[in-house]
Image (tube, grey):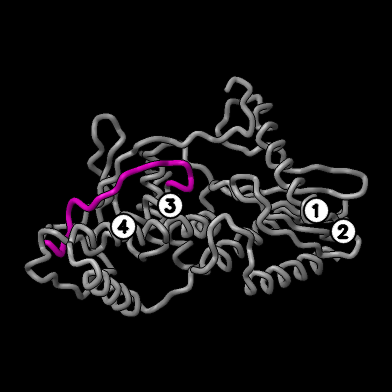
């Protein structure tokens, strides 16, 4: 089961956050912001642990805990999509790819959306909700 | 450039093109045309018009790159050379429905040309004589390439060197590699 989604811009700023379940932890908006930028930094630092001197790869992709998993996906341009879900959830990677598609279509192609700013696009909300429902169905 | 990789990219371009939604080429050509006329009316100086078109293209490019990466399945380019090939074989096909070729590499391998014979933006255009030596009608494309590459940390300069509307035998956009933006590390003790 999906818990929540974060979209983080290339500077580490949280530009979107949404919970999909009542069981998702509710934090204050400041805490979400702090969490996003901290994760952004940790991910950048974790890249330095990579044994191969690769320009590619973007550090931590998945964190597993007893109570939830966190899956991250980063585009070549540096935008990060992070989902949290209950531990048994499958296909999180595909879900994030799908969210990236939606972001490319319904956020960036909206001429009134300003790059790197918080996402307030109605179509994106609608399409995201559909993608979430589809994912929940495929997992049940 | 190995031919197997080239054909893989061609296939990726075809697949992305097949998947994408199509609109009438005339609609695009006419919209772009009235657009250019409007900018000429506003700015008058052809040089300034070229700059404005490039700027518009840049703003398209910085958004379009995400669409390109999301839909094309291209992940990493290991060199500027590879990036140029992918632009011509995948991106041109995906967004313009045409395939371009890359050539005219200089000896330092930091400058090349993207060449294409068919230009859907300029399908019906005949430049009036006063513009044939000054206006680059499709200069938008230069901006798109520059904007898109900047978002993947590659800084380039782009300009038209040949334009069929000016009587040249083909269309040629020159791309010059400037620098790779370094990834920002969130902390740096030394500084």
Residue under numbered circle 3: B148
Is B156 covered by the magenta stretch? yes
Residue at position x 73%, y 42% in the image: A39
Query: Which numbered dot is residue B4?
Result: none
Circle 1 SS class: strand
Residue under numbered circle 4: B54
Query: Which numbered dot is residue A24?
Result: 2
Residue at position x 28%, y 50% in the image: B114
Q: CA distance from mark 1 to mark 2?
A: 9 Å
Do marks 1 and 3 both belong to one polypeptide chain?
Answer: no
Of the two numbered discs 1 and 2 in the rendering, the one whose residue sits closer to the viewer: 2
Name the image quarter holding the C terminus of chain B. top right
Q: Dot 2, how many residues are within 10 Å of its Cα: few (below 14), some (14-19), or many (20+)?
A: some
Residue at position x 36%, y 65% in the image: B96
Q: Earlier in the sequence, mark 1 or mark 2?
A: 2
Residue under numbered circle 1: A84
Q: To which chain does the residue with label 4 belong?
A: B
Q: Is residue B94 above or below residue B37?
A: above
- Tags 1 and 2 in contact by the CB under 8 Å rule? yes
Q: Dot 3, how many residues are within 10 Å of its Cα: few (below 14), some (14-19), or many (20+)?
A: many
Circle 3 SS class: helix
Left or right: residue A124 compared with residue B89? right
Is B184 covered by the magenta stretch? no
Circle 2 SS class: loop
Residues drawn in magenta? B150-166
Of the two numbered discs 1 and 4 in the rendering, the one whose residue sits closer to the viewer: 4
Outermost residue on the left side: it is B129
Q: CA distance from mark 1 to mark 3?
A: 30 Å
Of the two numbered discs 4 and 3 in the rendering, the one whose residue sits closer to the viewer: 4
Outermost residue on the top side: it is B190
Q: CA distance from mark 4 to mark 3?
A: 12 Å
């Amino acid at each position: 089961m999906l818990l929540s989604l974060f979209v983080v811009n290339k500077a580490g700023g949280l530009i979107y956050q949404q919970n999909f379940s009542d069981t998702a932890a509710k934090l204050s908006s400041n805490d979400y912001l702090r969490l996003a930028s901290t994760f952004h930094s940790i991910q950048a630092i974790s890249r330095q642990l990579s044994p191969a001197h690769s320009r590619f790869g973007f550090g931590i992709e998945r964190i597993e805990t007893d109570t939830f998993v966190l899956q991250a996906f980063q585009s070549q341009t540096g935008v990060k999509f992070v989902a949290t879900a209950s531990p048994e959830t499958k296909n999180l990677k595909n879900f994030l790819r799908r969210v990236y598609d939606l972001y490319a279509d319904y956020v960036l192609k909206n001429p009134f959306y300003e790059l790197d700013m918080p996402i307030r696009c109605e179509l994106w909300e609608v399409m995201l909700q559909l993608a979430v429902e589809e994912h929940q169905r495929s997992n049940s | 450039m190995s031919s197997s990789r080239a054909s893989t990219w061609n296939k990726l371009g075809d697949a992305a093109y097949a998947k994408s939604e199509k609109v009438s080429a005339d609609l695009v050509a006419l919209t772009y045309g009235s657009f250019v006329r409007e900018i000429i009316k506003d700015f008058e100086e052809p040089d300034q018009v070229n700059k404005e078109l490039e700027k518009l293209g840049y703003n398209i490019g910085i958004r379009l790159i995400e669409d390109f990466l999301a839909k094309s399945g291209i992940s990493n380019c290991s060199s500027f050379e590879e990036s140029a090939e992918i632009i011509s074989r995948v991106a041109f096909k995906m967004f313009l429905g045409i395939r371009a070729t890359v050539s005219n590499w200089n000896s330092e391998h930091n400058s090349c040309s993207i060449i294409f014979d068919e230009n859907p933006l300029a399908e019906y255009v005949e430049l009036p004589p006063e513009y044939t030596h000054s206006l680059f009608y499709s200069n938008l494309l230069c901006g798109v390439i520059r904007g898109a590459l900047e978002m993947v940390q590659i800084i380039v300069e782009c300009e038209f060197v040949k334009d069929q509307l000016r009587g040249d035998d083909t269309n040629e956009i020159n791309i010059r590699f400037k620098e790779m933006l370094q990834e920002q590390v969130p902390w740096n003790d030394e500084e």
